[in-house]
Image (cartoon, coloured by chain):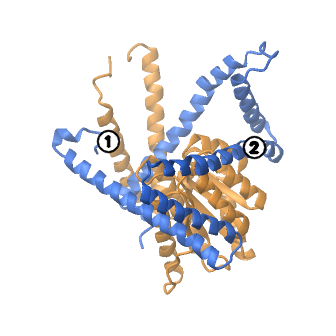
Chain colours: A orange, B blue
Amino acid sequence: MNLDGMLDNGMLGLFFVVIFGIILCTIFSFSRFQRISLRNISAFTDFVHEVSSAIETGQRLHLTLGRGSLNGVQGASAFIGLSILGKIVQSSYLSDYPPLATSGDANWSILSEDTYNKAAKEIEPDTRIQTDVNQMGGFTPMSYASSTLPIIYDQHVSLNVLSGHFGSEVALITDAAERSGARTLAGSDGLTAQAIIYSSVDDPLLGEELYAAGTYVQSGPQHLASLITQDVMRWILVLIILGGGLLHFLGILW
Amino acid sequence: MGYFIDLDLVGLNWLRQLILHWVVVLSAVAVLVGFANLFRTHWNKTTNRKPGSGFSLVTLVAMILTLVFVGFFGPTDPLSIWIFNNIQLPIEISLLAILAVVLIVASVRFLSRSPGVFSVIFISTVVVLIWGVASFPGLDFINFSSLRTWILQIPATAGARGLLLGVALGTIATGLRVLLGMDRPYEG
């Protein structure tokens, strides 16, 4: 049986996404009523502790959203960063040094400012719109990375959160965080950045762990539903891969 | 939708092109907003005499001069290209060179911070991969080149595919959450 020509790649991909969406909506409808235990990811356990510690010691939190484009697949990891930013602002907005957000893309700069102000107004409804806590770093990878260094060194940062698309320039950011004595929680969708993050960061998030951040920082039931859906689809893909390999081995499928 | 199916078949390709043009225009406007944000950040830093204000002043002067020259003469003018080739490019290359040193330091720090089986495997793999590329006189009897090829083709590819699979599922989930309106952290 030859599947080439029977299946159109575009329609197969669309079918996969539609099934993904149906499962996501179904689980989201029931997720509010579910209590699910999550496996322990030490990065997020330390994250909660570090946020509290930063507030108590009067230090700042810094979150950077990377340089991925909003218009491409690289933007998904930065959306996770926006969810984390909202929780960080809600937790530490009233501290001595409010959190800072940086990005290497103009779109994320605008979205992070909006997220920041939305979260700040939930804490203090009469607060004025903050225009100096979101900074556009630079338009090239190296200029973006080098623009975060003064923030890490000079702005009393105790915790850096890196969530977005990075390249090899992430090593400059993580090295600065290490030298300044700040803790770092980092994740990226790029393989190069993940390799660097694994070797240079206290709390690395590899693969899909970054996309679970919304659930672990309790950004809403939609993140829990998304996490469960990812697990379901992952098992489906595993069965398809193993089944396809077995069928190919038996000569039934080629 | 245009990514998965040929919209010409349903007569909607014109709509896709129209929306893409809107995206291009909005992205260009966002770049201008980002430029203004960058200018404002360094302006505040300079006028308030914060630490590093001298560097911010240099940044502001460079931004204004580049905007004036490239805006007046055009991006393909020899002066504009000179600015890029003789100022921006050397700076970026210098940072890349620093990056190489930073990565070496990070590797050493990684071994000292979390010594264990996986950190040793990680560093050993890096050494083998680098050694497989470079040719050291007198050490050619060690066939690192074929070992490097095997590592890249089998275990590295397998591991990378596992990571990418997870990233792909997370990307789809995030995109669907945004498109379906479940996740809007930026609503002002």
Disc 1 to disc 2: CB gap under 8 Å: no
Which numbered marker is on residue B101? 2
B2 over B161 or under it: above or below = below
x, y (%) of residue B10?
A: 16, 42
Residue farthest to the bottom, as pictured: A126
**Residue occupying the point 30% across, 28% down:** A7
The three-letter code of the residue at mark 2 reads Val
- Chain letter for mark 1: B
Q: Residues within 10 Å of mark 2 (few under 14, many from 20)?
A: few
Res A104 seen here: yes
Of label 1 and label 2, which has the lower sequence position? 1
**Residue occupying the point 54% across, 46% down:** A189
Query: In this view of the protein, which residue sits in the foreground, A149 or B35?
Result: B35
Residue A222: quarter of image: bottom left
The three-letter code of the residue at mark 1 reads Tyr
Quadrant of image for the C terminus of chain B:
bottom left
Residue farthest to the left, as pictured: B11
Give the side of residue B142 with respect to residue B182, left or right.
right
Q: Which residue is mark 1?
A: B3
x, y (%) of residue A58?
A: 72, 76
